[in-house]
Image (spheres, rainbow, N blue to C red):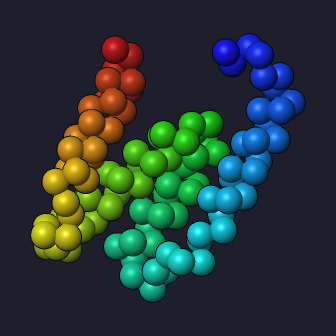
Amino acid sequence: MFGVVPAQAASVAMVLVGAMMMMHIGEIAWSDLSVAIPAFLAIVMMPFAYDIASGIGIGVIAYTVIKTAQGSLREVGLLMWVLSAVFASHFSMHALGL
């Protein structure tokens, strides 16, 4: 299925998706560092890692770690803990070459 779409068309679609994602940057509470730092890390890591999922994973882990360090455990939901564990295991397995 992916072979049907030429690379030129896919790159245009990715630029449009990136532009739509950037429209919501103004809604981030930049004054709250526990939200701003994970958002910044997610935004920056997506192009550096060449992978949207890795950027999201870094942001999820950073949010969980920062909120935990602040003592705001109740603000971190169960799904965020599960996602943080999944992303942390994925990154550690990748680092170990497994």
Please give left or right for residue 77 compared with residue 14 in the image. left
Q: Nearer the viewer, residue 95 or 49?
A: 49
Please give left or right for residue 28 compared with residue 19 in the image. left
Image location (x, y in percent) of residue 24? 59, 69
Position of residue 49 relative to residue 67, above or below, is above
Position of residue 11 relative to residue 63, above or below, is above
Q: Is residue 69 visible?
A: no
Position of residue 83 relative to residue 63, above or below, is above
Image location (x, y in percent) of residue 34? 34, 73
| Quarter of the C terminus within the rendering | top left
Q: For the point 74% across and 14% down, which residue is it?
A: 3
Q: For the point 38% across and 26% down, which residue is it?
A: 95
Please give left or right for residue 5 compared with residue 42 in the image. right
Q: Nearer the viewer, residue 76 or 95?
A: 76
For the image shown, how many numbered marks are present on the structure?
0
Please give left or right for residue 87 compared with residue 82 in the image. right
Image quarter of residue 1? top right
Image quarter of residue 96? top left
Image quarter of residue 2? top right
Q: For the point 21% across and 44% down, which residue is it?
A: 82
Image location (x, y in percent) of residue 20? 68, 59
Image location (x, y in percent) of residue 63? 32, 61
User: Extreme right residue here?
Assistant: 8
User: Extreme bottom residue here?
Assistant: 31
